[in-house]
Every structure is written in C-alpha cells, then in structure tokens.
Image (spheres, rainbow, N blue to C red):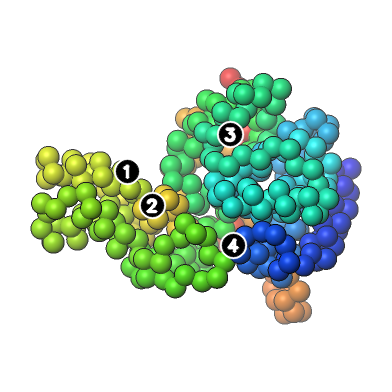
C-alpha cells in the first residue's frame, strides 16, 4: 500500500516541479540556483527521496495522517513536499539557513501544500519547539546530505536522544561515503581545495560561504585574538586547529598561550570544516566510531549502501547503473564499497 502511494506521489511531485518557472519565483538566488540544479535531475532526486521515505515508513504501524515526520536540514523542501504528497500531514521542516526557511514557505504555497511547522535552527531549536508544543510527538527523522556537514555529531544525536521523548526512527542519507574509493578520492580532493585554496563566490552561493581558504580564515581568527605569537607559531596553530569552529579554535589558542600545548589533534588527513559556520566539508566519518557513539546514546542502527538512480543519462550509463545496483543488492553491507551514498537507519529506543 505504501509503495503505491509513494509511486503516485513521486509522479505528481515531479510534474509539479517540472511545471515550475524557477526564475520567476520570489525566492533567494541561492534556492533558485539549488532548485534549478535539482530540477535538471528531478526524476533521480525524487526517486531517491521516495526510496528513503519507503525505508523509513515500511512496516510502520502509525497511520500516515497521524505520523509526525521531521525533515532535518530540509533545504528547498523536496523531501517535505514528497512526504506531504504521500499523505503525511504532520511535518516539521528544520533548516539552519534562514533563507531556506523563508523560501520553503513560498515554495510550499506555490506547489499547493500547507506546511505548518517550520523551524530555523538545529536540533536544539527543534527540541525547544517540541517542548513548547506538547501535542507533537516525533515518529521519525529523515535527512539527506546533512549528516556530513553537522559539526558535532556526538552532540547532535545525544541532544536528540535526551530531548525527544519516546522511541523514534531515524534515517540519514549521506553522499560522503568513505568506503567507495572513487568517492573517497573525489571528496578528499574537494576537502584539500577548501582547506588550501581561495574560491570564487558565484551567483546563488550561500551568503554565509566565504571565498577564503579555511586555513586562511583560521589564521585571521588567531591573529585577531592575540598579537604575541610569532609568524611560525600562527602558521603551526592554524594547521593544528583544522576541523574546529571559531570558539573551539580560541579555546585551543588560550590553552597554547598558557601551556604551549594543545589538547586537540585531528586524526584524519583531509577532513576539514568551515571555521566560521562549523559546517564540515563532506565529513568522511569513521563508521566504527560513529556506531559506538550511536550505541552510547541508545540508538540501534545499521549503515546500509544506497543505490544509483537513472537521470536520463543514456543507455550505456543506465545499463552500468543497473549492473552496479544488482551488485550492491547482492553484496549487502559490502556494497558500500561501490555505493554512491550510505544510509544510517535505525531507532532511538525509549529504554
């Protein structure tokens, strides 16, 4: 039954998105650019979101009209719109970027959806909202391409575990698959460029994105905080604080000024984050560490391989993707080594 609803919902939403004149919408340049990119591959995007929703909702005992879904890091809202089209009436859209929160109001109305709950913030703001609205009880949290940008994953899932009452399901998908060698090469290259090279600010970029390399930003943070360090020390500390947000960089600098030592050391050779926002550049997560973090916070999860989706890219690519999907299905968890993305799926137990 849910399979059929999702199939019908996907077709309806794809038609609605294809009929949108994105450039004429009263939304930000960022989401005009982002939604335009998504529109160019809308079949593949909506197919993927449909599969993720099916994984979350399959065998669900709660009626869709009573189910409360959190779309965490919802962006331009495609996951939310598909869930609404399926028949989920209670959805909380959450995004840290205020522009997206404003734009999703316009987009949902334009597409003919009623979206009551919109939260601009992170898990803390979600928990505060739920605390102020006791009638809302979360059944599931879904997210795609957000996990790899969350600054403090342990804090994120701990806060959700402690702040949301009862059991709830989670499903987070991420394209930063560290097991796929091809993905790994591409993502490490992207991380190195973000860390060391200045970037052009293009039309439609987020206003929060700096054009400076991350290491340059960390040097500025250090120099603005103190003028007693030698140039060599500044360079060394900027290197040593890779992967930290500004407030944590300053804690390490203060410690260094007192003791000439740091309490922080990043183990990964290329992982790095924006020092101002804390957003990781495609965080390549250590699965063993992550599984332990989730277990410690009462989550029973598994990490699964995602599959490839056809985007009208020609017969040869279509055949290759089908063969890869067959292998992924056949290999099970080992399929992560050829999968384009991975899925964190499970439940936070109430006991």
User: What whole-number distance in Å separates the C-alpha atoms at marks 2 and 1?
Assistant: 9 Å
Q: Earlier in the sequence, mark 1 or mark 4?
A: 4
Q: Earlier in the sequence, mark 3 or mark 1?
A: 3
- Residue drawn at x 55%, y 50% is 97
- Quadrant position of residue 166: top right
In the image, residue 83 lies at what x, y percent? 77, 45
In the rendered structure, the answer to whether residue 142 lies left or right of residue 21 reads left
User: What whole-number distance in Å separates the C-alpha atoms at marks 4 and 3?
Assistant: 24 Å
Q: Earlier in the sequence, mark 2 or mark 3?
A: 3
Q: Earlier in the sequence, mark 2 or mark 1?
A: 1
User: What whole-number distance in Å separates the C-alpha atoms at marks 1 and 4?
Assistant: 27 Å
Residue position marked by numbered label 4 in the rendering? 30
Q: Earlier in the sequence, mark 4 or mark 2?
A: 4
Question: Is disc 1 placed on a helix, strand or loop?
Answer: helix
Question: Is disc 2 placed on a helix, strand or loop?
Answer: loop
In the image, residue 123 lies at what x, y percent? 54, 36
Residue position marked by numbered label 3 in the rendering? 126
- Quadrant position of residue 337: bottom right
């Amino acid at each position: 039954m849910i399979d059929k609803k999702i199939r019908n919902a996907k077709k309806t939403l794809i038609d609605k998105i294809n009929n949108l004149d994105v450039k004429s919408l009263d939304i930000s340049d960022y989401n005009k650019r982002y939604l335009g990119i998504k529109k160019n591959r809308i079949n593949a995007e909506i197919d993927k979101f449909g599969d993720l929703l099916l994984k979350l909702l399959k065998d669900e005992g709660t009626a869709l009209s009573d189910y409360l879904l959190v779309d965490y890091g919802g962006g331009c809202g495609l996951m939310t719109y598909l869930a609404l089209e399926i028949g989920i009436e209670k959805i909380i859209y959450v995004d840290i970027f205020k522009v997206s929160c404003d734009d999703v109001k316009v987009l949902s109305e334009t597409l003919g959806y009623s979206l009551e709950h919109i939260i601009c913030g992170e898990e803390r703001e979600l928990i505060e909202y739920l605390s102020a609205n006791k009638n809302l009880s979360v059944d599931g949290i879904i997210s795609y391409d957000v996990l790899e940008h969350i600054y403090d994953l342990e804090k994120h899932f701990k806060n959700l575990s402690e702040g949301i009452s009862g059991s709830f399901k989670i499903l987070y998908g991420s394209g930063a698959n560290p097991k796929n060698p091809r993905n790994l090469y591409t993502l490490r290259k992207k991380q190195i460029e973000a860390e060391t090279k200045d970037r052009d600010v293009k039309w439609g970029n987020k206003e929060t994105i700096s054009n400076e390399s991350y290491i340059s930003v960390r040097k500025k943070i250090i120099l603005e905080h103190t003028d007693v360090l030698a140039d060599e020390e500044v360079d060394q500390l900027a290197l040593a604080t890779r992967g930290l947000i500004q407030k944590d960089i300053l804690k390490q600098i203060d410690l260094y000024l007192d003791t000439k030592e740091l309490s922080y050391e990043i183990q990964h050779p290329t992982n790095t984050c924006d020092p101002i926002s804390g957003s990781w550049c495609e965080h390549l997560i250590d699965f063993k560490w992550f599984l332990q973090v989730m277990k410690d916070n009462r989550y029973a999860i598994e990490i699964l391989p995602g599959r490839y989706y056809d985007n009208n890219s020609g017969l040869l690519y279509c055949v290759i993707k089908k063969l890869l999907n067959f292998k992924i299905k056949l290999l099970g968890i080992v399929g992560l080594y050829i999968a384009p993305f991975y899925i964190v799926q499970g439940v936070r137990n109430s006991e």
